[in-house]
Image (cartoon, helix red, strand yellow):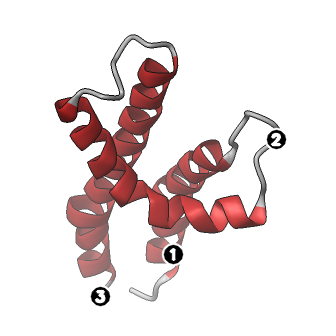
Amino acid sequence: MQDFMLALYQYFLNPILTLLLFVLFGYVIMSWLFMFNVLSPYGPRARQIYSMLESILEPLLRPIRNTIPPLGQLDLSVFILALLILFTRDWLLPQLIFAMPG
């Protein structure tokens, strides 16, 4: 059972959490590009990509935003979500798998 869970983690959960982390980084970078007018938020292609990233991340960010409100213009929910993904991927799931009986 432990071998199955380790394979599930290595070949399914770890890549999905890593991909989610890259989506989060893309979301942050695009929001910065919009904020500093490097990328026009009115362009249809950029707006479509940003909307897709937002639709993936908003269900994960909303509970964090409800718990920890933004500090002025600083939104900590993205940072906290990145920490939660890294914690889950790199520590929690391996600990749970190796704690399972042989």
Q: Quadrant of the C terminus?
A: bottom left
Closer mark to the observer between disc 2 and disc 3: 2
Residue 98 in view of the camera = yes
- The crowd level at tag 2 (other Cα within 10 Å; few <14, some 14-19, many 20+) is few
Q: Which residue is mark 1?
A: 96
**Earlier-in-chain disc, 2 versus 3:** 3
The x and y percentages for residue 3 are 26, 76
Residue 1 — which label? 3
Picture residue at 33% right of the left edge, 81% below the top: 2
The x and y percentages for residue 25 are 42, 35
Q: Name which residue type carries label 1.
A: Leu
Residue 21 — which label? none
Q: Quadrant of the N terminus?
A: bottom left
Is label 2 in a helix, a strand or a loop? loop
The span from disc 1 to disc 3 (Cα, nearest Å) is 12 Å
Closer mark to the observer between disc 2 and disc 1: 2
**Left or right of 80: which side holds 14?**
left
The span from disc 2 to disc 3 (Cα, nearest Å) is 45 Å
Mark 1 and mark 3 residues within 8 Å of each other at the beta carbon: no
Picture residue at 40% right of the left edge, 38% below the top: 27
**Above or below for 77 versus 25:** below
Mark 2 and mark 1 residues within 8 Å of each other at the beta carbon: no
- The crowd level at tag 1 (other Cα within 10 Å; few <14, some 14-19, many 20+) is few
Picture residue at 35% right of the left edge, 40% below the top: 22
Residue 71 — which label? 2
Closer mark to the observer between disc 1 and disc 3: 1
Is label 1 in a helix, a strand or a loop? helix
Q: Name which residue type carries label 3.
A: Met
The x and y percentages for residue 96 are 51, 75
**Left or right of 88: which side holds 45?**
left
